[in-house]
């Protein structure tokens, strides 16, 4: 299969855009990616648009605004993994030789729901009984705290770290640093989570231009390579499952490392799916950055903060950058590409050569999560 490179990225600052439509959000990110690649729009042969709740024909609605029409457009829904799944579809299309240049879009407008938790499918029996995502992650947190002695103060430090990173990111929705005391004193949402331990809802869009590695030098002298593109789905379990181990991510990480020919020790920077504070800690372990049960101590060591050995969520992550569901995976890729190019400004991870993105989507009974997409990039 052919190699794949990223030659252009763009996004809009995440936030609340109540007066804008989905297309209003998406087209500026696409134009920014096209400009970043220095590419003629006519070179783009196909587009893949990820959105979970954006409605029909989201990609066509966006591309119609800038006259990029008449090409194949695939709209992809895979919960929080929607645009990372779109990214994988783009990667596979180039690897197979079907196209040389493709566009990937991630977009979402959550303010149309007026706030509250994400709407899940009522036909699911757990959802019909009242399950919402904060409650699910709260159960994971409580079990982990029981098993390994993790404290509420350690959980709060995930928010403190990511808000400090987000304060350095002009595209982040939450750009004000917070203290542990502020995190713990914020409104209780689902014990042990307070408000500042839950990702905010909002709107956003991000876009990526991919091309065959063999032609990347037409656009950039040093393009970023995609070393692994993994997508997997959860395994249905009818009975007990260990809520301290995110099985789908453990399996996906193993597959991605094998495809890339790399291991956790090679990763310099990672964007992981920190929808709630406990999630980031679980993913430290799932990706092999530390041993099972050691995530709290690993966080407190400073290893995952700027200046540490494996910087996690330098963008601010979902907790600070925000989580417009369908836009998240693409935005993670934008951050990692900028980090590997050395273009991340005050939040730059020094000497970053290998980066990882991880977006996982849940909300159905019997599954750890329904979908998980992981990408590994390198200079």
Image: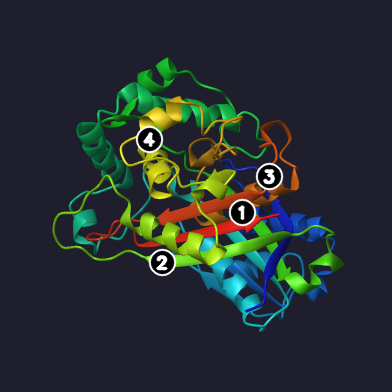
Say whether residue 268 is visible: yes
Q: Secondary structure at mark 4?
A: helix
Of residues 308 and 207, the one nearer the viewer is 308
State which mark lies toward you, 4 or 1: 4
N-terminal-most mark, 3 or 2: 2
Q: Where residue 178 is drawn, which disc sits there?
A: none
Toward the left, the furthest residue is 239
Q: Secondary structure at mark 1?
A: helix
Is residue 350 depicted above or below 36 in this figure?
Answer: above
Is residue 302 depicted above or below 258 in this figure?
Answer: above
Distance, label 1 to label 2, CA atoms, is 18 Å
Toward the top, the furthest residue is 181
| Residues at marks 2 and 4 touching, judged by CB atoms closer than 8 Å | no
**Left or right relative to 357: residue 250:** left
Of residues 189 and 317, the one nearer the viewer is 317
State which mark lies toward you, 3 or 4: 4
Residue drawn 31% across and 24% down? 152
Q: Quadrant of residue 285?
A: top left
Distance, label 3 to label 2, CA atoms, is 26 Å
| Residue that numbered label 3 is attached to | 339
| Residue that numbered label 4 is attached to | 295
Q: Secondary structure at mark 3?
A: helix
| Residue that numbered label 2 is attached to | 232
Residue drawn 68% across and 44% down? 339
**Which percent across, then down, holds residue 104?**
64, 65
N-terminal-most mark, 4 or 1: 4
| Residues at marks 3 and 4 touching, judged by CB atoms closer than 8 Å | no
N-terminal-most mark, 1 or 2: 2
């Amino acid at each position: 299969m052919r190699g794949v490179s990223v030659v252009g990225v763009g996004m809009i600052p995440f936030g609340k855009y109540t007066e804008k439509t989905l297309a209003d959000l998406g087209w500026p990110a696409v134009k920014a990616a096209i400009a970043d690649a220095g590419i003629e729009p006519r070179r783009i042969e196909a587009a893949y648009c990820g959105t979970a709740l954006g409605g029909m024909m989201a990609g066509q609605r966006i591309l119609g605004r800038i006259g990029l029409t008449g090409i194949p457009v695939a709209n992809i829904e895979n919960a929080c993994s929607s645009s990372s799944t779109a990214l994988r579809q783009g990667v596979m299309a180039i690897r197979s030789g079907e196209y040389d240049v493709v566009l990937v879009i991630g977009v979402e407008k959550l303010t149309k729901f007026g706030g509250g938790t994400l709407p899940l499918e009522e036909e699911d029996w757990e959802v019909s009984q009242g399950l919402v995502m904060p409650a699910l992650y709260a159960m994971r947190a409580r079990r982990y705290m029981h098993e390994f002695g993790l404290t509420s103060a350690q959980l709060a430090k995930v928010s403190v770290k990511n808000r400090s990173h987000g304060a350095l990111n002009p595209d982040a929705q939450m750009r004000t640093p917070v203290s542990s005391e502020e995190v713990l004193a914020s409104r209780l949402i689902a014990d042990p989570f307070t408000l500042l331990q839950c990702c905010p809802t909002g709107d956003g869009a991000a876009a990526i231009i991919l091309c065959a590695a063999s032609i990347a030098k037409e656009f950039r002298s040093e393009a970023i390579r995609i070393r692994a593109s993994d997508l997997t789905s959860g395994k249905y379990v009818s009975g007990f499952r260990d809520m301290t181990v995110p099985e789908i991510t453990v399996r996906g990480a193993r597959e991605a490392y094998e495809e890339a020919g790399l291991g956790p020790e090679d990763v310099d920077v990672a964007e992981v799916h920190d929808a709630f504070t406990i999630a980031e800690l679980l993913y430290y372990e799932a990706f092999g950055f530390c041993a099972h049960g050691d995530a709290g101590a690993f966080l407190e060591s400073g290893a995952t903060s700027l200046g540490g050995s494996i910087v996690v969520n330098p963008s601010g992550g979902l907790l600070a950058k925000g989580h417009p569901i369908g836009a998240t995976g693409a935005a993670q890729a934008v951050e990692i590409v900028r980090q590997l190019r050395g273009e991340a400004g005050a939040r730059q991870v020094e000497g970053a050569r290998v980066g990882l993105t991880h977006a996982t989507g849940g909300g159905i009974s019997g599954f750890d999560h329904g979908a998980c997409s992981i990408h590994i990039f390198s200079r």
